[in-house]
Image (tube, rainbow, N blue to C red):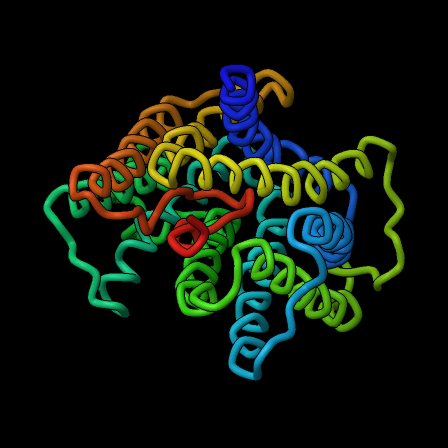
């Protein structure tokens, strides 16, 4: 029993390391492949991996109703197609550490979205967490001067990465309804398949240099290894491990590990990509992480299941876990 619990904690520690590494691999892939084609093949690989994971853990995919199908198509359009197109475009110029911190705004945006759309209570601590995360993001976006955002001095690439957070928030909020009738793994697999189909259309219709068709792109061995990392460990393996942690420890305790994702992303970018750690990234990043931690901590003190447990791509949405316990 003790060895099983130790193995579980090791897996949960590896999850944020893997998800942090996705920004490193995304930077490599974006430098070698057109965004739409790279995003498509990332999810071709991820969809195959998720299908195998589903067969292993839950058997064949369940049949869907029309309402479920429409919800999953919307999830694929937002959290897979839109997110990954923006991710690949943004990662061409935005440093990996910076992108990870901007994308980690997702929990704060999700809290605001659930409050506006579903009437979820905004306690003082949740408001404090949201405001702290937003201030931190403004420090990162403004390169140390949050007021520069008001004067339009934010790069287009940074804004594209911010759209990633908005896309994932939409995915999360749509998933809140879909997951009342489907398991998280079934939802994720179907959304990945829907998003892959939409990415194929984008790869066919978008002009160069944004796309190069649906055939496997030309890239180095490192580029393809990075794409495999995004698709298999980053999507399927980390999801399975995180779902195991949620099932055995509960979503709140599992969320503590996931909050480390941007920290691992910054450290890996510094070591592997030799990215310079600007003071604005360090300061703003600390505020973002603190805000996300505060948002998750509120759920523990209030005795409720968390509606926001992760803020990164890596792949599972904060609100999908309540139905999985």
**Residue 18 horizontal side relative to residue 1, left or right:** right
Where residue 121 appears, as percent x and y from the top left, is 16, 57
Quadrant of residue 294 within the rendered picture: top left
Would you identify the image quadrant in which residue 115 lies? Answer: bottom left
Q: Residue furthest bottom?
A: 66
- Count the marks: how many? 0
Relative horizontal placement of residue 18, taking residue 310 as reference (left or right): right
Q: Locate residue 201 relative to residue 255 in the image: left or right.
A: right
* 144 vs 160: above or below: above
- The residue located at (38%, 41%) in the rendering is 251
User: Visible in this render: residue 265?
Assistant: no
Query: Residue placed farthest to the front in the image?
Result: 1
Where's residue 199, x and y in %? 70, 65
Tell me the residue at 34%/48% (across/down): 308
Is residue 217 or residue 4 the one in the foreground?
A: 4
The location of residue 86, given as percent across then percent down, is 58, 55
Q: Which residue is drawn at 26% across and 68% down?
A: 118
Instruction: Find residue 260 and report its horizontal and vertical position in percent.
Output: 43, 28
């Amino acid at each position: 029993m003790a060895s099983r619990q130790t193995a579980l904690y090791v897996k949960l520690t590896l999850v944020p390391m893997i998800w942090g590494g996705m920004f490193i691999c995304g930077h490599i892939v974006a430098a070698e492949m057109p965004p739409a084609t790279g995003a498509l093949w990332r999810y071709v690989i991820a969809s195959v991996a998720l299908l195998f994971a589903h067969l292993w853990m839950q058997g064949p995919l369940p049949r869907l109703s029309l309402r479920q199908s429409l919800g999953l198509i919307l999830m694929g359009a937002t959290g897979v197609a839109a997110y990954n197109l923006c991710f690949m475009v943004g990662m061409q110029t935005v440093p990996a550490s910076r992108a990870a911190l901007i994308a980690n705004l997702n929990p704060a945006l999700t809290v605001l979205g659930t409050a506006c759309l579903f009437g979820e209570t905004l306690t003082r601590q949740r408001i404090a967490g949201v405001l702290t995360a937003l201030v931190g993001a403004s420090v990162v976006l403004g390169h140390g001067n949050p007021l520069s955002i008001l004067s339009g001095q934010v790069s287009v690439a940074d804004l594209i990465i911010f759209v990633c957070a908005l896309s994932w928030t939409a995915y999360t909020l749509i998933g809140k309804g879909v997951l009342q009738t489907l398991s998280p793994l079934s939802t994720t697999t179907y959304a990945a398949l829907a998003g892959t189909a939409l990415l194929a259309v984008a790869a066919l219709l978008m002009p160069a240099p944004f796309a190069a068709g649906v055939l496997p792109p030309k890239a180095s061995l490192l580029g393809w290894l990075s794409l495999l990392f995004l698709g298999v460990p980053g999507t399927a393996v980390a999801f399975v491990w995180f779902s195991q942690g949620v099932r055995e420890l509960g979503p709140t305790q599992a969320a503590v590990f996931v909050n480390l994702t941007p920290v691992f992303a910054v450290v890996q970018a510094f070591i592997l990509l030799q990215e310079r750690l600007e003071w604005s990234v360090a300061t703003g990043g600390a505020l973002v992480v603190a805000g996300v931690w505060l948002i998750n901590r509120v759920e523990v003190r209030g005795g409720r299941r968390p509606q926001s447990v992760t803020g990164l791509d890596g792949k599972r949405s904060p609100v999908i876990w309540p139905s999985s316990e």
